[in-house]
Image (spheres, helix red, strand yellow):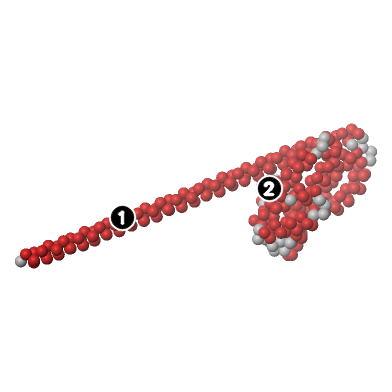
Amino acid sequence: MEGQHHHHHHLQQYQYHHQQQQQQQPTSSVGADADRFPQWSIQETKEFLMIRAELDRSFMETKRNKLLWDVISTRMREKGYNRSAEQCKSKWKNLFTRYKGCETMEEEAMRQQFPFYNEMQLIFSARMQSMLLSEGEGGATGSKRKAAVQLSSDEEEDITEEKELEKSSVKKKKQGKTSGNNSNSIKEILEDFMRQQMEIEMQWREAFEARETERRLKEMEWRQKMEALENERLLMDRRWYEREEQRRIREEARAEKRDALITALLNKLRREDHM
Protein backbone atom coordinates (compact mmCIF):
# COMPACT_ATOMS: atom_id res chain seq x y z
CA MET A 1 0.00 0.00 0.00
CA GLU A 2 2.79 2.38 0.93
CA GLY A 3 4.48 1.71 -2.42
CA GLN A 4 1.24 2.57 -4.23
CA HIS A 5 0.90 5.85 -2.37
CA HIS A 6 4.51 6.64 -3.21
CA HIS A 7 3.84 6.03 -6.91
CA HIS A 8 0.70 8.21 -6.89
CA HIS A 9 2.60 11.19 -5.52
CA HIS A 10 5.46 10.37 -7.87
CA LEU A 11 3.11 10.87 -10.82
CA GLN A 12 1.72 14.14 -9.43
CA GLN A 13 5.14 15.60 -8.68
CA TYR A 14 6.50 14.45 -12.04
CA GLN A 15 3.72 16.22 -13.95
CA TYR A 16 4.18 19.45 -11.96
CA HIS A 17 7.97 19.63 -12.25
CA HIS A 18 7.98 18.54 -15.86
CA GLN A 19 5.47 21.25 -16.81
CA GLN A 20 7.73 23.80 -15.06
CA GLN A 21 10.65 22.48 -17.07
CA GLN A 22 8.69 22.80 -20.32
CA GLN A 23 8.07 26.52 -19.64
CA GLN A 24 11.76 27.19 -19.07
CA GLN A 25 13.79 24.90 -21.34
CA PRO A 26 12.24 23.97 -24.72
CA THR A 27 12.93 27.27 -26.48
CA SER A 28 16.61 27.32 -25.65
CA SER A 29 17.11 23.61 -26.41
CA VAL A 30 15.42 23.89 -29.79
CA GLY A 31 17.50 26.94 -30.62
CA ALA A 32 20.69 25.15 -29.61
CA ASP A 33 19.83 22.17 -31.83
CA ALA A 34 19.16 24.50 -34.75
CA ASP A 35 22.59 26.11 -34.29
CA ARG A 36 24.51 22.84 -34.02
CA PHE A 37 22.80 20.69 -36.63
CA PRO A 38 21.13 21.18 -40.02
CA GLN A 39 17.36 21.64 -39.85
CA TRP A 40 15.30 18.43 -39.88
CA SER A 41 12.63 18.40 -42.58
CA ILE A 42 9.12 17.13 -41.84
CA GLN A 43 9.63 14.09 -44.08
CA GLU A 44 13.01 13.30 -42.50
CA THR A 45 11.49 13.51 -39.01
CA LYS A 46 8.64 11.18 -40.01
CA GLU A 47 11.14 8.66 -41.44
CA PHE A 48 13.14 8.93 -38.20
CA LEU A 49 10.04 8.29 -36.06
CA MET A 50 9.11 5.25 -38.15
CA ILE A 51 12.55 3.73 -37.51
CA ARG A 52 12.46 4.70 -33.81
CA ALA A 53 9.00 3.10 -33.46
CA GLU A 54 10.27 -0.19 -34.90
CA LEU A 55 13.07 -0.28 -32.31
CA ASP A 56 11.09 1.05 -29.33
CA ARG A 57 10.76 -2.36 -27.70
CA SER A 58 14.55 -2.83 -27.86
CA PHE A 59 15.03 0.58 -26.23
CA MET A 60 12.70 -0.46 -23.40
CA GLU A 61 14.60 -3.70 -22.81
CA THR A 62 18.10 -2.27 -22.45
CA LYS A 63 19.75 0.57 -20.55
CA ARG A 64 22.84 0.67 -22.78
CA ASN A 65 21.33 1.84 -26.04
CA LYS A 66 24.26 3.45 -27.86
CA LEU A 67 24.27 0.58 -30.36
CA LEU A 68 20.56 1.16 -31.03
CA TRP A 69 21.22 4.81 -31.91
CA ASP A 70 24.02 3.63 -34.24
CA VAL A 71 21.49 1.33 -35.92
CA ILE A 72 19.05 4.23 -36.35
CA SER A 73 21.85 6.41 -37.79
CA THR A 74 22.70 3.66 -40.30
CA ARG A 75 19.04 3.22 -41.27
CA MET A 76 18.72 6.99 -41.79
CA ARG A 77 21.76 6.98 -44.09
CA GLU A 78 20.16 4.16 -46.10
CA LYS A 79 17.20 6.47 -46.63
CA GLY A 80 19.47 9.33 -47.75
CA TYR A 81 19.70 11.31 -44.48
CA ASN A 82 23.18 11.84 -43.02
CA ARG A 83 22.55 11.91 -39.27
CA SER A 84 24.92 10.71 -36.57
CA ALA A 85 23.81 8.59 -33.63
CA GLU A 86 24.20 11.59 -31.31
CA GLN A 87 22.04 13.76 -33.59
CA CYS A 88 19.32 11.09 -33.65
CA LYS A 89 19.41 10.78 -29.86
CA SER A 90 19.23 14.57 -29.45
CA LYS A 91 16.29 14.74 -31.90
CA TRP A 92 14.39 12.09 -29.94
CA LYS A 93 14.93 13.95 -26.66
CA ASN A 94 13.66 17.15 -28.28
CA LEU A 95 10.55 15.42 -29.67
CA PHE A 96 9.89 13.70 -26.34
CA THR A 97 10.12 17.04 -24.49
CA ARG A 98 7.67 18.68 -26.90
CA TYR A 99 5.33 15.69 -26.74
CA LYS A 100 5.19 15.78 -22.94
CA GLY A 101 4.57 19.54 -23.12
CA CYS A 102 1.39 18.91 -25.14
CA GLU A 103 -0.37 17.11 -22.26
CA THR A 104 -2.17 20.23 -21.02
CA MET A 105 -3.02 21.69 -24.46
CA GLU A 106 -6.28 21.56 -26.39
CA GLU A 107 -6.17 18.97 -29.17
CA GLU A 108 -6.38 21.45 -32.07
CA ALA A 109 -3.72 23.79 -30.66
CA MET A 110 -1.56 20.79 -29.80
CA ARG A 111 -1.56 19.46 -33.38
CA GLN A 112 -0.78 22.91 -34.79
CA GLN A 113 2.20 23.50 -32.49
CA PHE A 114 3.53 19.93 -32.64
CA PRO A 115 2.86 18.29 -36.06
CA PHE A 116 4.39 14.96 -34.99
CA TYR A 117 2.02 14.39 -32.07
CA ASN A 118 0.20 11.51 -33.83
CA GLU A 119 3.44 9.67 -34.59
CA MET A 120 4.68 10.08 -31.01
CA GLN A 121 1.29 9.06 -29.63
CA LEU A 122 1.35 5.85 -31.68
CA ILE A 123 4.77 4.95 -30.24
CA PHE A 124 3.60 5.42 -26.67
CA SER A 125 0.28 3.69 -27.38
CA ALA A 126 2.12 0.63 -28.67
CA ARG A 127 4.36 0.80 -25.60
CA MET A 128 1.29 0.86 -23.35
CA GLN A 129 -0.22 -2.14 -25.15
CA SER A 130 3.03 -4.04 -24.72
CA MET A 131 3.05 -3.19 -21.04
CA LEU A 132 -0.52 -4.43 -20.58
CA LEU A 133 0.30 -7.73 -22.26
CA SER A 134 3.36 -8.25 -20.06
CA GLU A 135 1.63 -7.38 -16.77
CA GLY A 136 0.93 -10.14 -14.28
CA GLU A 137 -2.07 -9.98 -12.01
CA GLY A 138 -2.31 -6.15 -12.11
CA GLY A 139 -3.16 -4.39 -8.80
CA ALA A 140 -0.27 -2.88 -6.89
CA THR A 141 2.47 -4.60 -8.88
CA GLY A 142 1.14 -3.39 -12.21
CA SER A 143 0.65 0.16 -10.93
CA LYS A 144 4.17 0.37 -9.50
CA ARG A 145 5.62 -0.75 -12.83
CA LYS A 146 3.68 1.78 -14.87
CA ALA A 147 6.13 4.71 -14.93
CA ALA A 148 9.19 2.49 -15.42
CA VAL A 149 7.68 0.67 -18.38
CA GLN A 150 6.59 3.84 -20.13
CA LEU A 151 10.03 5.53 -20.13
CA SER A 152 13.22 4.36 -21.81
CA SER A 153 16.63 5.15 -20.33
CA ASP A 154 17.03 8.19 -22.62
CA GLU A 155 13.69 9.60 -21.53
CA GLU A 156 14.52 8.96 -17.90
CA GLU A 157 17.63 11.13 -18.26
CA ASP A 158 15.37 14.11 -18.97
CA ILE A 159 13.55 13.76 -15.64
CA THR A 160 16.44 12.80 -13.31
CA GLU A 161 16.38 16.14 -11.52
CA GLU A 162 12.62 15.95 -11.05
CA LYS A 163 12.95 12.53 -9.46
CA GLU A 164 15.51 13.85 -6.97
CA LEU A 165 13.09 16.60 -5.95
CA GLU A 166 10.26 14.12 -5.67
CA LYS A 167 12.13 11.86 -3.23
CA SER A 168 12.17 14.38 -0.38
CA SER A 169 8.61 15.51 -1.09
CA VAL A 170 7.21 11.98 -1.20
CA LYS A 171 8.97 10.99 2.03
CA LYS A 172 7.27 13.84 3.87
CA LYS A 173 3.85 13.09 2.48
CA LYS A 174 4.15 9.37 3.25
CA GLN A 175 4.29 10.10 6.98
CA GLY A 176 0.96 10.06 8.86
CA LYS A 177 -1.10 8.57 5.98
CA THR A 178 -3.69 5.91 6.89
CA SER A 179 -4.55 2.66 5.15
CA GLY A 180 -7.86 4.24 4.03
CA ASN A 181 -5.95 6.96 2.15
CA ASN A 182 -3.74 4.31 0.57
CA SER A 183 -6.85 2.51 -0.69
CA ASN A 184 -8.13 5.76 -2.20
CA SER A 185 -4.76 6.30 -3.86
CA ILE A 186 -4.90 2.87 -5.50
CA LYS A 187 -8.40 3.57 -6.76
CA GLU A 188 -7.32 6.92 -8.19
CA ILE A 189 -4.32 5.36 -9.90
CA LEU A 190 -6.48 2.66 -11.49
CA GLU A 191 -9.06 5.22 -12.62
CA ASP A 192 -6.30 7.39 -14.07
CA PHE A 193 -4.82 4.38 -15.83
CA MET A 194 -8.17 3.45 -17.41
CA ARG A 195 -8.78 7.03 -18.48
CA GLN A 196 -5.36 7.23 -20.12
CA GLN A 197 -5.97 3.93 -21.86
CA MET A 198 -9.25 5.21 -23.31
CA GLU A 199 -7.54 8.39 -24.48
CA ILE A 200 -4.78 6.35 -26.12
CA GLU A 201 -7.30 4.17 -27.94
CA MET A 202 -9.18 7.26 -29.11
CA GLN A 203 -5.97 8.85 -30.41
CA TRP A 204 -5.03 5.63 -32.17
CA ARG A 205 -8.47 5.41 -33.80
CA GLU A 206 -8.28 9.02 -34.97
CA ALA A 207 -4.82 8.47 -36.40
CA PHE A 208 -5.99 5.30 -38.17
CA GLU A 209 -9.01 7.07 -39.67
CA ALA A 210 -6.82 9.97 -40.80
CA ARG A 211 -4.41 7.57 -42.53
CA GLU A 212 -7.32 5.70 -44.12
CA THR A 213 -8.80 8.95 -45.43
CA GLU A 214 -5.43 9.97 -46.83
CA ARG A 215 -5.05 6.55 -48.47
CA ARG A 216 -8.49 6.83 -50.11
CA LEU A 217 -7.71 10.33 -51.39
CA LYS A 218 -4.40 9.17 -52.85
CA GLU A 219 -6.08 6.15 -54.44
CA MET A 220 -8.76 8.40 -55.97
CA GLU A 221 -6.10 10.77 -57.27
CA TRP A 222 -4.17 7.84 -58.75
CA ARG A 223 -7.29 6.52 -60.50
CA GLN A 224 -8.03 9.95 -61.95
CA LYS A 225 -4.48 10.15 -63.30
CA MET A 226 -4.79 6.69 -64.81
CA GLU A 227 -8.10 7.62 -66.45
CA ALA A 228 -6.57 10.80 -67.86
CA LEU A 229 -3.64 8.80 -69.28
CA GLU A 230 -6.02 6.24 -70.78
CA ASN A 231 -8.12 8.97 -72.40
CA GLU A 232 -4.98 10.57 -73.78
CA ARG A 233 -3.86 7.21 -75.19
CA LEU A 234 -7.24 6.64 -76.85
CA LEU A 235 -7.13 10.12 -78.36
CA MET A 236 -3.65 9.51 -79.75
CA ASP A 237 -4.76 6.16 -81.17
CA ARG A 238 -7.75 7.81 -82.87
CA ARG A 239 -5.57 10.53 -84.38
CA TRP A 240 -3.12 7.93 -85.63
CA TYR A 241 -5.96 5.93 -87.22
CA GLU A 242 -7.33 9.05 -88.91
CA ARG A 243 -3.90 9.93 -90.31
CA GLU A 244 -3.43 6.39 -91.61
CA GLU A 245 -6.87 6.46 -93.21
CA GLN A 246 -6.11 9.74 -94.97
CA ARG A 247 -2.77 8.37 -96.17
CA ARG A 248 -4.47 5.24 -97.53
CA ILE A 249 -7.04 7.34 -99.42
CA ARG A 250 -4.25 9.46 -100.98
CA GLU A 251 -2.34 6.32 -102.00
CA GLU A 252 -5.44 4.86 -103.65
CA ALA A 253 -6.11 8.11 -105.51
CA ARG A 254 -2.52 8.20 -106.80
CA ALA A 255 -2.76 4.55 -107.85
CA GLU A 256 -5.98 5.22 -109.79
CA LYS A 257 -4.41 8.17 -111.60
CA ARG A 258 -1.35 6.11 -112.45
CA ASP A 259 -3.48 3.25 -113.79
CA ALA A 260 -5.59 5.64 -115.86
CA LEU A 261 -2.45 7.23 -117.33
CA ILE A 262 -0.94 3.84 -118.25
CA THR A 263 -4.22 2.70 -119.80
CA ALA A 264 -4.48 5.89 -121.88
CA LEU A 265 -0.89 5.43 -123.08
CA LEU A 266 -1.47 1.82 -124.11
CA ASN A 267 -4.62 2.76 -126.03
CA LYS A 268 -2.72 5.48 -127.84
CA LEU A 269 0.06 3.09 -128.80
CA ARG A 270 -2.46 0.55 -130.13
CA ARG A 271 -4.14 3.18 -132.29
CA GLU A 272 -0.84 4.23 -133.78
CA ASP A 273 0.02 0.61 -134.60
CA HIS A 274 -3.26 0.12 -136.50
CA MET A 275 -2.64 3.21 -138.55
- Tell me the SS state at disc 1: helix
Q: Is residue 246 left or right of residue 195?
A: left
Residue 227 image label: none
Position of the C terminus by quadrant: bottom left
- Type of the residue with mark 1: Glu
Q: Residue 80, how many percent across, how many down?
A: 65, 61
Q: Residue 144, how many percent across, how many down?
A: 85, 41
- Type of the residue with mark 2: Asn
| Circle nearer the N terminus (2, 1) | 2
Visible residue check, residue 10: yes
In this view, 102 is above or below 274 = above
The mark closer to the camera, 2 or 1, is 1
Occupied quadrant, residue 135: top right
Farthest residue, direction left: 275
Q: Is residue 275 left or right of residue 209?
A: left
Q: State the separation of the CA atoms marked 2 and 1.
A: 60 Å
Farthest residue, direction right: 176
**What residue is shown with label 1?**
245
Q: Residue 228, how many percent across, how many down?
A: 46, 51
Farthest residue, direction front: 273
Residue at (62% x, 42% y) in the render: 209
Q: Is residue 124 left or right of residue 272?
A: right
Residue at (79% x, 57% y) in the render: 66
Visible residue check, residue 109: no
Q: Could you say which is closer to the camera, residue 233 or residue 204? A: 233
Q: Could you say which is closer to the camera, residue 72 or residue 129? A: 72
Q: Residue 5, how many percent across, how many down?
A: 88, 39
- Tell me the SS state at disc 2: helix
**What residue is shown with label 2?**
118
